[in-house]
Image (cartoon, coloured by chain):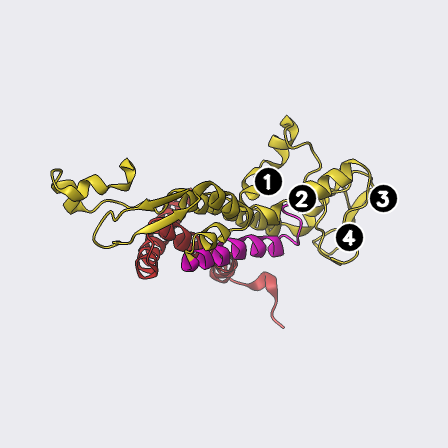
Chain colours: A red, B yellow
Amino acid sequence: MFDVPQLTNVAWILMFAATGAARLWYAVPLIISVSLVCAATRHERMGSILIHALRFAIWVLVFMGIVLGVIQILSWMQ
Amino acid sequence: MTKSQPAANSESNVEIELKDPRLAAFLAWLVPGLGHLYQGRTGKGALFFVCILGTFFYGLYIGDGRVVYASTEDMFSRRFLSERWQYICQLGVGLPALPALVQRQRELNGKPPLFGAALGNWSMRPPSKNAPAGGFQSKDLTGDGRIVQHPDELAKWNYELGESFEIGTVFTVIAGLLNILAIFDAYGGPLVIPDTDDKKKPDDKSSDKNPETR
């Protein structure tokens, strides 16, 4: 058994990061569903819908990554 | 009433027969994808059905079946808007959100909720206004055995479910909003973005076929 209070600062940061990352999995079904539905409202053919959905999903992921980066930088500057 | 949407660009050169757009829009609201199935657009109907209802019921599952039912206020009151405005968005998903209205009315009339025993742990009912003996209590989540007293049952649900209540609410709200897009699609067809070629050639006959001018 390891002693929890003896964890190093890095270990604590990694543990909190892992908890936050676990929460991010909730975004996966949302991104899939939102990108497919939005793409389906712009095309009629299934092939076009899937291509548009893929592009949209990548765009959302990049946007989320940028926001995450900005928030992380702001938290470091505090 | 039948409305045909002409081709808008070479990539999506498809003629769509939008059979009775108003009825299709109503069906699309009632059950996501049903309006498209009615119009014979089976693939898109199945996609909307799976994506929107999947998102809605996953949210309901995360929120322990409570996130759509979490108010006993009159829907048109100011208190409802401040306490549970999310239900207006959730209502966009149609039939799956409607039982909340029935359960809320039964609670307001002092009647027991429908299917109370059949749903087991799932609480597909509004928060009760009648506090049990000792009030609304739950065990302290830090595990030190203390009892936490809540002002009402909604506060108790929020405390016990924690972030799951919020995440479940977000999923169901997004499902309702997505279905509004699907309703517009059933009514007016897909929003086709014109090709850059169409923009460059305003004199071209194909520019007359822009769906935005129909």
Q: Nearer the viewer, residue B140 or B199?
A: B199
Name which of mark 2 and mark 1 comes first in the sequence: 1
- Secondary structure of residue under mark 3: loop
2 and 1 marks in contact (CB < 8 Å)? yes
In the rendered structure, which amino acid carries the disc numbered 4? Gly
Magenta segment: does it hold B47?
A: yes
| Dot 3 and dot 1 within a common chain | yes
Circle 3 sits on which residue? B132
Of tags 2 and 1, the one toward the viewer is 2
Give left or right: position of B155 versus A3: right
What crowding class fits label 1: few (fewer than 14 Cα within 10 Å), some (14-19), or many (20 or more)?
Answer: many
Numbered tag placed on residue B87 in the rendering? 1
Give left or right: position of B78 versus B133: left
Magenta segment: does it hold B204?
A: no
| Dot 4 and dot 1 within a common chain | yes
Of tags 3 and 1, the one toward the viewer is 1
Give left or right: position of B140 versus B96: right
Q: Which residues are magenta?
A: B42-69
Q: Residue at x 70, y 54 (%)?
A: B142
Numbered tag placed on residue B100 in the rendering? 2
Circle 4 sits on which residue? B116
**Chain letter, disc 3 residue:** B
What crowding class fits label 3: few (fewer than 14 Cα within 10 Å), some (14-19), or many (20 or more)?
Answer: few
